Image (spheres, rainbow, N blue to C red):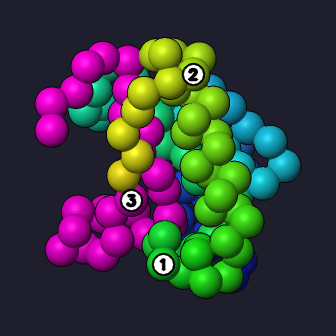
Amino acid sequence: MSASDNCLFCGIAAGTIPSEKVYEDETTVAFKDIHPKAKVHVLVIPRHHYRDVAELAQEDPAELAHIVGIAQHIADERFHGAYRLEFNTGEDAGQSVFHVHAHVLTGEVMAE
């Protein structure tokens, strides 16, 4: 898949849409969520466009593993390593941007 001209996260990954980045490398970008649900709420996205985590897992499982590693890195830096990792897949599950993104929630003790 290629970048979509009208995809918000493709624009963030390309640097044409501003974000508060906390991590980036050649394949992946992590940035603060604009509507945080925890003290630390970071979104981790691949630069390459995939619709959702199921498509990413099928097309590039190594990138999915890399995203999980970045989540751990963020939690290690910002809160003794504990974190919640969420992927919303499909509109009925709460996915509102159809470019796969992991929500890393950390920075405080979280309820179930």
- Residue 55 on the magenta segment: no
Give 15 or 49, whichever is nearer the viewer: 49
Q: Which residue is mark 3?
A: 87
CA gap, disc 1 and disc 2: 26 Å
Task: State whether residue 31 is above or below residue 22.
Answer: below
Q: Which residue is mark 2?
A: 76
- Residue 90 on the magenta segment: yes
Q: Which residue is mark 1?
A: 54
Q: Closer to the N terminus: mark 1 or mark 3? A: 1
Q: Residue at x 63, y 30 (%)?
A: 73
Could you say whether the residue bearing mark 2 is in a helix, strand or loop?
A: helix
Q: Amino acid at mark 1?
A: Ala
CA gap, disc 1 and disc 3: 10 Å
Could you say whether the residue bearing mark 1 is in a helix, strand or loop?
A: helix
Q: Amino acid at mark 3?
A: Phe
In-image side of 74 versus 63 (left or right)? left
Task: State whether residue 47 is above or below residue 29.
Answer: below
| Tally of numbered tags | 3
In-image side of 97 versus 63 (left or right)? left
Residue 12 in view in this figure: no
Which corner quadrant holds the N terminus?
A: bottom right
CA gap, disc 2 and disc 3: 20 Å
Q: Amino acid at mark 2?
A: Asp
Q: Nearer the viewer, mark 2 or mark 3?
A: 2
Q: Residue at x 48, y 78 (%)?
A: 54
Q: Quadrant of residue 9?
A: bottom right
Instruction: Mark 1 and mark 3 in contact? Answer it, CB < 8 Å.
Output: no
Which corner quadrant holds the C terminus?
A: top left
